[in-house]
Amino acid sequence: MSKILVIEDTELIRENLADILEFSGYEVYTAENGKIGVELAIKHLPDVILSDILMPVMSGYEVLETLRSNPSTFFIPFIFLSAKADRENIRHGMALGADDYITKPYKNDDLLASIKVRLEKTKNIREKADEKISQIRNVLSTSLPHEMLTPLNGINGFSQLLLNDLKDLEKDEIELMVRNIHNSGKRLNHLIDNYILYNQLNVLGKNYENLTSVKKSFIPSFKIHEISNDLKSEYNREIDIQTYDDELVLETNDILFSKIIFEILDNALKFSKKGIIQLKAYAKEDNFHITIRDEGRGMTEEQINSIEAFTQFDRDDYEQQGMGLGLCIVKTIINLIDGEFNIQSELEEFTEVNIGIPIISFS
């Protein structure tokens, strides 16, 4: 049974609302002023709150502001009931975070319909949140241990072979094992770095600059070539690079810039088995633009719109590594610096990632 809190200082109206709602199958709590309403909201966490605006002790606006500042009541749908129906009051209520505004006198059907809409919306949000939480739990309980244990097993296994048979191994065999240990260590380090960075970015939000040193000029093309050469060697693939070679001061530092380039290029190489990866980078107006295109399996529009942490597409159909954090981290960084991020793709044809990073100044 859904719970409704009614905050109304006029006793007759308050009791009438309670009768209507109880008859419609809701559990109802009532408060004769805003202060009591806030206390009841925190105590009972109702599914919807109906509130008058002009009340003693605390106005409806003050009630809404108080509840929106409390994490436990922040998401509770809030509907104003008031005779104050002018545009300014409605705009003010909506600006504070109200979900609806019903003017007195109102029809019972309109009131119940509004409540039903808010409950359905909340239900849908909760279902999606529960689905995402379940997905994350599944990833953390299955994929995360696998992603960490796989490279760790490689490190332990090859190092044990070296310890046991070092005297009997040929030079090329030792080199192969050391290379495998090195690659496994890089994979494990990449996973841990991404996990830590993702959490830092989400905790710090707009204060993400605490992660960075003072922005300095650097040559983006140098970083691009440096990262590309490492990945070309690792994947034994070609990357066609066209870059802008001047020094720039970007709205991010060279460390996060390198992270952006690495994650997009690594994804392009990982999810395409043929063709040359194309990378173009150039300065235009107030942005440094980067375009990376591959001839891979592509993405659907739904997948592009669903890029988020711990999400990997078609994992059951393709053997792949990682936690689905790479593009999510790129997207998060770009959003934090008010840059540009978009993806164009066609299934089994290509994927093209376009990035725009604001330029602070030219050196």
Image (cartoon, grey):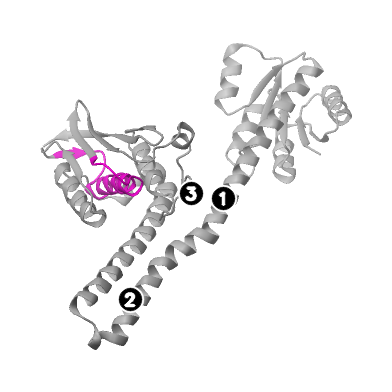
Q: Secondary structure at mark 1?
A: helix
Q: Are marks 1 and 3 in contact (CB under 8 Å)?
A: no
* Residue 131 lies in quadrant: top right
Q: Secondary structure at mark 3?
A: loop
Residue nearer the viewer, 34 or 306: 306
Please give the label number shown on residue 10.
none
Q: Residue 120's x, y, as percent?
A: 70, 31
Residue at mark 2: 158
Q: Secondary structure at mark 2?
A: helix
* Residue 349 lies in quadrant: top left
Looking at the rendered image, the quarter that the C terminus falls into is top left
- First in residue order: circle 1 vs circle 3: 1
Q: Horizontally, is 343 left or right of 233 in the view? A: right
Please give the label number shown on residue 317.
3
Amino acid under label 2?
Phe
* Residue 31 lies in quadrant: top right
Residue 139 vs 153, above or below: the answer is above
Q: Nearer the viewer, mark 1 or mark 3?
A: 3
Q: Are marks 2 and 3 in contact (CB under 8 Å)?
A: no
Q: In 3D space, how far apart are the residues under numbered discs 1 and 3 (Cα atoms)? A: 18 Å
- First in residue order: circle 1 vs circle 2: 1
Residue drawn at point x = 41 percent, y = 35 percent: 347
Residue 257 drawn in magenta:
yes
Q: Which residues are magenta?
A: 248-277
Residue drawn at point x = 42 percent, y = 66 percent: 150
Amino acid under label 1?
Gln
Q: Horizontally, is 147 left or right of 98 in the view? A: left
Q: Residue 274's x, y, as percent?
A: 29, 44
Residue 79 drawn in magenta:
no
Residue at mark 1: 135
Residue nearer the viewer, 150 or 309: 150
